[in-house]
Image (spheres, helix red, strand yellow):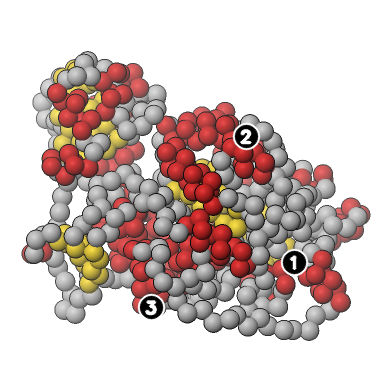
Amino acid sequence: MDGILLFSDKFLRLISILSFQPILFKLPSFPVVPPEFIQSRQNPRVQNLARLHERTHRDQQQRFLVEGRRELERALARGIVEEIYFCPELFRNNGGDDLIQRATQAGLALCQLAESAFDKVSLRDGPDGLLGVGRAWTTALAGLKLSPTPLLLIVERVEKPGNLGALLRSADAAGIDAVIVCDPVTDLFSRNMAVPISQAFKVCTYVIGQKLKGVKRYPLVLMLEPLFRCNLECEGCGKIQYPEHILKKRVTAEQALAAAEECGAPIVSIAGGEPLIHPEINAIVDGLIKQGRYIYLCTNALLLERKLDSFTPHKQLTFSIHMDGLKEEHDKSVCRDGTYEIAVAAVKKAVARGFRVTTNTTLFNNANPERVRRFFDEMMELGVESMMISPGYPYAKAPEQEIFLERNRTKTLFTQILGKAKKSWRFNHSPTFIAFLKGKVDYDCTPWGNPTYNVFGWQKPCYLLGDGYASSFKELIDSTEWSRYGQKGWDERCKDCMVHCGYEASAVNDTFSSLGGLGRTIKYMLNADAAGDPIPATARAIAPKTATQTAEAQSGAATCGGSHSCGCAPEAKTEQTTPASRS
């Protein structure tokens, strides 16, 4: 069967070397052979390594590059590395000496490169002096071990590595025996995987586990707000308009880690405020990594360059950089000139240092589709892993109210921006959430999918609304009147909302709820411009409201459910009704 690649279920976990758990490789000892030293950039071996940047040469030689100590450790543990090239001057105390010593004792082929020669073969702006050459592999038809009644997934001409990776992860989670790729177009050994397989696999197994347990309302991403204070005052922000005594409060590292354990979500988004201001941010990140959670540390990047040395690159840590468009749009959105250049410089440095970096973009009704598309191009050129996008939510306390989108305008705008999306763009979203933004599918909100924990406790019902607070996650789930919210509810504040913190979880739930949902995800994964599903008009519920509820829903004057802990009432009343103070 010419032109067909087959992958068994075990091979699904080997597609991306960058995803494996770090395992120190142990190989038998051999007589030590001094490594060759190459100084010239024109050396034939150096030139051949540089050719492996291109897919054509990777395919011809059936070899590929693995750069970075962490990635090289994982590849060595799997036994697929043929050669190691290193430059001690670039090690930067990253454990390179120890790795080379072990590789030497194991008898692996080693070659030392001068700094200029290593720079030619490196794929990074700031290399750490370690690079390996791995051998490609395939799985033959005869090697497949199928069940008596196998379930196969057959895909044709998938172009984007990220799409193929997502297909493989979904197939693995759904228990599919094998994936058959017909007329393969994508590069199986490309570095352009949008999300590490280990992260996607953790989320897949977590969601399936919740469904097998019969859990109806489970969290997917914990929105952790350790503080509200920020070093910017963005025009669309509703998080920084608290009184001074609230802005001084902090969630301690101990409280943050306890909340993550209590909630159990596999992913934690650390928001705010500006998290890098928090004095215990490193302890929070380190503790969440030890818990096995994947972290998106949201930051405007003004402090990122000077803070980078306090963090260590890790597959579970991603810096999510707030970028609201090109220079003109971004600086206007954050109300400060020069922030775009600072953020771009920080992104470059973080990427060069080996950190995972994504961007987080909020779009308003003044967005220009063509300039947004140019912005996507610029972010991809910076080397970010992927991009997150969302329409802005009309916070009642946001300084500029006229910039927010209503629902139909959101669909029109995102259709203009995302129609005929470029192959180079990578988004950190489910394909069906992108389709939802374009109006091709319809979902109701899943507010419990992204529960929020902040200085007041567990916020009801979601990240965007503050209708009171619970003292525990269980109390949040059990006591919140969920039927009030979303498109099928009666709360008018939800009518135009299409924000990812409410609907990304809906898209994920759809994928794993049925074969129809999985099929829908695959359809939009393969063709983002595929025709949409028939969408019936959503019937919003009507329920009797108290006079207070009616006034709040119409005016948006209070987003705290009457508790006034948000600071919308005089400070004296706030002190009486705010949950127990947290340092």
Label 1 to label 2: alpha-carbon separation = 33 Å
Above or below: residue 236 compared with residue 485: above
Above or below: residue 84 compared with residue 318: above
Seen from the viewer's position, the closer of residues 461 and 402 is: 402
Mark on residue 498?
none
Give SS at disc 1: strand
Above or below: residue 473 compared with residue 249: below
Q: Amino acid at mark 2?
A: Thr
**Residue 464 percent across, percent down from the top left:** 67, 60
Q: Amino acid at mark 3?
A: Gly
Q: Amino acid at mark 1?
A: Asp
Above or below: residue 193 compared with residue 431: above
User: Going 42% across and 45% down the picture, which residue do you hit?
Assistant: 385
Label 2 to label 3: alpha-carbon separation = 44 Å
The answer to whether residue 179 is visible is: no
Seen from the viewer's position, the closer of residues 13 and 165 is: 165
Dot 1 corresponds to which residue?
A: 467
**Residue 48 percent across, percent down from the top left:** 17, 30
Q: Quick one: label 1 or label 2, which is nearer the N terminus? A: 2
Callout 2–callout 3 Cβ contact below 8 Å: no
Q: Is residue 50 left or right of residue 371?
A: left
Dot 2 corresponds to which residue?
A: 339
Looking at the rendered image, the disc whose residue lies closer to the viewer, 1 or 3, is: 3
**Residue 473 percent across, percent down from the top left:** 63, 65
The answer to whether residue 368 is visible is: yes
User: Going 50% across and 55% down the picture, which residue do you hit?
Assistant: 417
Label count reads: 3
Dot 3 corresponds to which residue?
A: 516
